[in-house]
Image (cartoon, grey):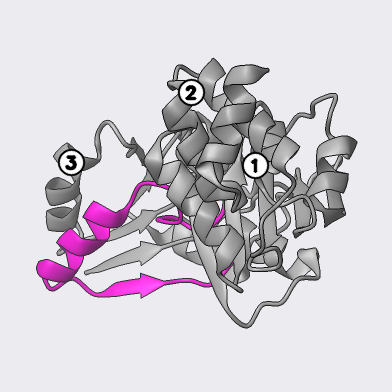
Amino acid sequence: MAFVVVPTPIGNLEDITLRALRILSEADLVACEDTRRTGRLLAHHGIKNKLVAYHERSEERLAPELAERARAEKVALVSDAGTPLVSDPGYRLLVACIEAGVTVEVLPGPSAPITALVASGLPADTVVFLGFLPRKGSERTNLLARIREEPSTFVLFESPRRLAKTLGELPAVASVAVCRELTKLHEEVFRGTAGDAAHHFSEGTKGEIVLVVRGGTAAGPGDVEDAVALARGYVAEGESPSRAAAQAAKVSGRRRSEIYDRLVSS
């Protein structure tokens, strides 16, 4: 019959379309990450429906089953917040429905990355969405180097616990917007340089965060002391001094030998 991707509010429960409410009320089944959270949303809007937990741990098992059900029933997919599939489960199910010949509908609606991008005040003509940065390793180093070198606007999710670290690894002069608790009571959008933001959030923060960064604005070498400090952070995470210096050189644009010499002599 049909498979419908339904965006839900990222914070404010009023941010849901009339079409989304109609689809959710008509659906024979609503697949969601957390049945309790989605249940509260549906109850808020007076909707009673059959929910099934569909998350990272059950996705591979349930995708074929739900795609088969969508042949004869209307199956809706929601995530905990925002548009499904954007750093959320749903890709396997969407592909399974397409391959099964099921009609697929995707509703427009709330999306934290798009909301943050617009609120950031940074260029929105060439945009790269990175999801969550890897916590460490070469993949993280390569992505940070890409942000430094590529003149695009980058949008990524970040944990409050790791925000300070990420801001410290960006060029201090890079333009950023730290968008916290979007659409919620304590919404905050901090606009400035990465250095300014690192200072502003130096004592930590809370809530859900989207970080928007203007890339390519500091392609030249950064301050060597910042690079050495970055290398020390890699060593603290378990990297050897040599590898830490190499990673810091890739991010900062400074010479590896320069960083290594200062690192081992400090």
Q: Residue at x 65, y 39 (%)?
A: 227
Identify the disc placed on residue 241.
Answer: 2
Helix, strand or loop at label 2? It is helix
**Is residue 126 shown left or right of residue 26?**
right
- Packing grade of label 1 (10 A; few <14, some 14-19, many >=20) is many
Q: Which amino acid does the dot numbered 2 rest on?
A: Pro
Q: Position of residue 141 (x, y in %)?
A: 47, 44
State the CA–CA distance, disc 2 to disc 3: 41 Å
Marks 1/2 in contact by CB < 8 Å: the verdict is no
| Nearer to us in this view, 154 or 206 | 154
**Is residue 6 shown left or right of residue 188?**
left
| Nearer to us in this view, 149 or 119 | 149
- Packing grade of label 3 (10 A; few <14, some 14-19, many >=20) is some
Which is more N-terminal, label 2 or label 1?
1
Quarter the C terminus occupies: top right
Q: Nearer the viewer, mark 2 or mark 3?
A: 2
What residue is pinned by disc 3?
A: 60
> The magenta stretch spans which residues?
81-109
Q: Is 61 located above or below residue 98 in the figure?
A: above
Q: Is 183 located above or below residue 261 in the figure?
A: below
Which is more N-terminal, label 3 or label 2?
3
Helix, strand or loop at label 1? It is helix
What residue is pinned by disc 1?
A: 169
| Nearer to us in this view, 199 or 183 | 199
